[in-house]
Image (cartoon, coloured by chain):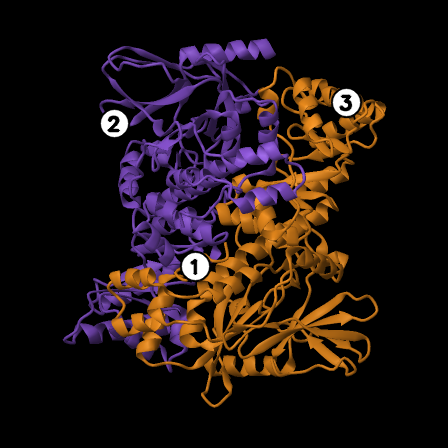
Chain colours: A orange, B purple
């Protein structure tokens, strides 16, 4: 999958602008930031994901003969520019926040420093990949938070195309799902694949009991029986109990076993099924639920003491149903003056929140030393350093009178942006999905409970350094 | 792109069920129907799409050595079954409603007739592909309906991964968009690519006028200037007018030219910009708008006489924002009795709308002869025929007292399901995307205006033949 040529996975205007820069012989280095403006699903944070696929894309960037021929056929590109494309190779540098990190609005998740033609070309694909995977990782994280544990990603059939299923499963695993039904994702990313059987399995047998019995004898290590084909409590659960008891009494007992509820009221049915299983001496049988689940329904089912041990979540996870786009943007932040310095650039807007942060920047995370929790994030120029032994005054970049003094020694600082490409060469080794998932779990532990809440969470403050704030004001005053 | 091996793009349970059928030596032929239960976005219809990619997928179905090795590593598949997979080839038959057809709930869009192992395997990918493209085609059709014409698909950066961008663009073109910004989709499907420039183009020049001037000299055949980088009415439009007038007075006039509005109130700004352009003698300059458009906003902007000639629609189209999943399902309809007959199967549910239609079926569309509009669709057994010279009594399958008598000679009948694969061989040639788009336009013309309406449309009736209705009732009574 990594060898697909996605070079033309770009908006036409990137190429028309590139030709413009090419004809004017604009070779200056520029800086673009990829960031987002508000958390999906009105949440308190996002989980960034997709970097490994961005790396694959950048490494593989090249216009092959068919690409050049196609562009020529459009009749708007001239031969010298097409010749330039034929030899195109990404020569810039990229910084990014590692996958699985908890992130907040306005922070550069990806920073591209490259000659203007190259920096422009990669815009669309970087946005496409990071927007998608960060969206699904964030949604999955919310669902895992609501469930506590045991969330399985079951959405492939409703995903927006093959990639949405494959990379959506990847993002879901990063954010804490315990497995996916998607076999191709299991193969590609070495993550657990899970699943049971469909109603059609039951319907091809003479009766439900026989269908269950066959399934159990096939998969004795982990046997989940779907109990709602005919009638959950009158037929499905009794037949499952009969099969479980028969195996329990036999020489070949099932190792792990349980039932799956896939329709009806999951709170009521799970409580009734739990009682029936327990009365039958099958306390070890687990109950899995599926059917249009999301974090809100899971939250309510748990409030109502539903007896559900694991959750198969499909459509609403894999499409991020209540918020199906991440909204990341890619904005020019600085232009080289040719002498080794970057001139900060700003994009103004009538909407204050849409005004960009100018210059070559980085992100520092400030942790409260005692709790290890995130106190705030600080966007600064890339060459600014912060010594955790010094006092640090944080202030809100809009309501500047809102100030917090961090006393030296009470906090810790960590820079989030990490070098990925240097002068065209990849200098970063992507961790495995399992490693990213373990890191993501640690990351979520640095959030206060108030920020993890599903509804009206407490926002984490993303502040600007004094120096960045001053330069931004100066630019705004000039333009105003 | 057609050569990607998507054989493992399946839910694990398809494979575990397959092994179960394999071990029981179940080789009977079965019939599965793919259909959906309600129109996206509370609309009156859907547009089916994705068949060409389903064909590519089925043609290319094979488990290569790495696939078999991966499945072996899971520890749940036995060697005889893995050997079967190594030699797997799809040998069944597939019928489908051609892409671009207007379709309604409950109708089989795809019918798979195959040995049970094969029919089970293809479930997930067929659902993934048809669900995605039908969703986006339907959403795009609604947006095109609201706009009247001139809708451009600009959503790649917010699509749910590369495929969602590529095949979403394909579906959007089928449904009537005039072009896409996605260059890879343009190349893959031979459809027009479109675009202008970004704010970053303006920001790398000393001033907006100079940036416009350069852009116009580069692209004199079709020059769209983005006018909202600094201030739309005070800076952007006046600078664009200056450039347009200079070119108009020169030896090298622009062929087609206009402006793009990308922020602010598009009704107000478009009317003001139109006045300014007209006063400057630039009646031929067009106005394009973008910025979080969907069918609802476009509908309102047009109600308010916004002076917008074309529409760049991104996020809300490419994700079908208000309804990001199509909800198609794949259900067992019949099992062969080994003697050439199919035994109808039914899946019951407490929810009447979720009860499946049993048997080997097809779909006939009934047109009113006089208007050419759709009167109703009729789901029947595949071997039933309808002669348009005979009287035809249609009745609602839930409220059976609701009846319509179609007098012989006043209607026409067309069968929608078309043979695609016969005994494993593809016998269908997919039309080009442009051809499908032209056919889709004809299809939409067969809908009454009342059904095309965005809000509370009049539903098209999907009825059952008397014979199918009777068999369904018989099966229900047996199970009840």
Q: Which residue is mark 3?
A: A241
* Rendering coords of residue A184 (x, y %): 56, 45
Instruction: Please give left or right for residue A475 compared with residue A257 in the image.
Output: left
Q: Secondary structure at mark 3?
A: helix
Q: CA distance from mark 2 to mark 3?
A: 57 Å
Q: Quadrant of residue A256?
A: top right
Residue beneath the point at 35% across and 67% down: A15
Q: How many residues crowd mark 3 within 10 Å: few (<14), some (14–19), many (20+)? A: many
Q: Which residue is mark 2?
A: B372
Above or below: residue A258 compared with residue A163: above
- Tell which subunit mark 1 falls on: A
Q: Which residue is mark 1?
A: A6
- Tell which subunit mark 3 falls on: A
Viewer-closest of A73 and B245: A73
Residue beneath the point at 70% across and 22% down: A213
Of badges 2 and 3, nearer the viewer stands 3
């Amino acid at each position: 999958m990594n060898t697909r040529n996605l070079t033309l996975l770009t908006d036409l205007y990137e190429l028309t602008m590139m030709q413009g820069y090419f004809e004017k012989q604009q070779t200056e280095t520029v800086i673009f930031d990829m960031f987002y403006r508000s958390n999906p699903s009105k949440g308190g944070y996002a989980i960034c994901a997709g970097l490994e696929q961005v790396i694959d894309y950048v490494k593989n960037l090249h216009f092959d003969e068919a690409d050049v021929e196609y562009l020529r056929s459009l009749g708007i590109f001239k031969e010298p520019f097409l010749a330039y494309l034929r030899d195109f190779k990404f020569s810039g540098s990229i910084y990014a926040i590692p996958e699985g990190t908890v992130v907040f609005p306005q922070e550069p998740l990806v920073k591209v420093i490259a000659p203007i033609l190259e920096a422009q070309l990669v815009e669309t694909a970087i946005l496409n990949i990071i927007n998608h995977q960060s969206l699904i990782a964030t949604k999955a994280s919310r669902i895992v938070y609501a469930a506590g544990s045991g969330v399985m990603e079951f959405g492939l059939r409703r995903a927006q195309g093959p990639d949405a299923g494959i990379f959506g499963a990847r993002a879901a695993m990063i954010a804490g799902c315990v497995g996916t039904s998607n076999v191709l994702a299991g193969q590609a990313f070495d993550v657990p694949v899970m699943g049971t059987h469909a109603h059609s399995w039951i319907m091809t047998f003479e009766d439900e009991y026989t269908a269950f019995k066959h399934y159990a004898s096939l998969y004795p290590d982990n046997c989940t029986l779907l109990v709602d084909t005919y009638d959950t409590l009158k037929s499905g659960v009794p037949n499952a109990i009969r099969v479980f008891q028969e195996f329990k009494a036999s020489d070949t007992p099932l190792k792990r076993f349980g039932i799956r509820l896939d329709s009806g009221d999951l709170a009521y049915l799970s409580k009734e099924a739990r009682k029936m299983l327990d009365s039958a001496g099958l306390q070890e049988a687990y109950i899995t639920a599926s059917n249009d689940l999301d974090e809100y329904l899971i939250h309510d089912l748990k409030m109502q003491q539903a007896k559900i041990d694991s959750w198969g979540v499909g459509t609403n996870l894999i499409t991020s149903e209540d918020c199906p786009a991440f909204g990341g943007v890619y904005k020019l932040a600085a232009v080289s003056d040719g002498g080794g310095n970057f001139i900060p650039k700003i994009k103004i807007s009538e909407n204050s929140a849409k005004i960009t942060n100018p210059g070559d920047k980085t992100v520092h995370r400030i942790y409260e030393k005692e709790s290890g929790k995130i106190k705030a994030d600080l966007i600064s120029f890339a060459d600014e350093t912060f010594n955790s032994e010094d006092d640090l005054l944080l202030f809100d970049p809009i309501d500047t009178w809102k100030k917090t003094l961090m006393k030296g020694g009470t906090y810790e600082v960590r820079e989030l942006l990490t070098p990925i490409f240097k002068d065209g060469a990849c200098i970063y080794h992507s961790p495995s999905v399992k490693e990213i998932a373990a890191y993501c779990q640690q990351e979520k532990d640095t959030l206060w409970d108030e920020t993890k809440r599903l509804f009206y969470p407490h926002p984490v403050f993303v502040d600007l350094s004094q120096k960045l704030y001053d330069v931004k004001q100066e630019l705004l005053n000039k333009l105003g």
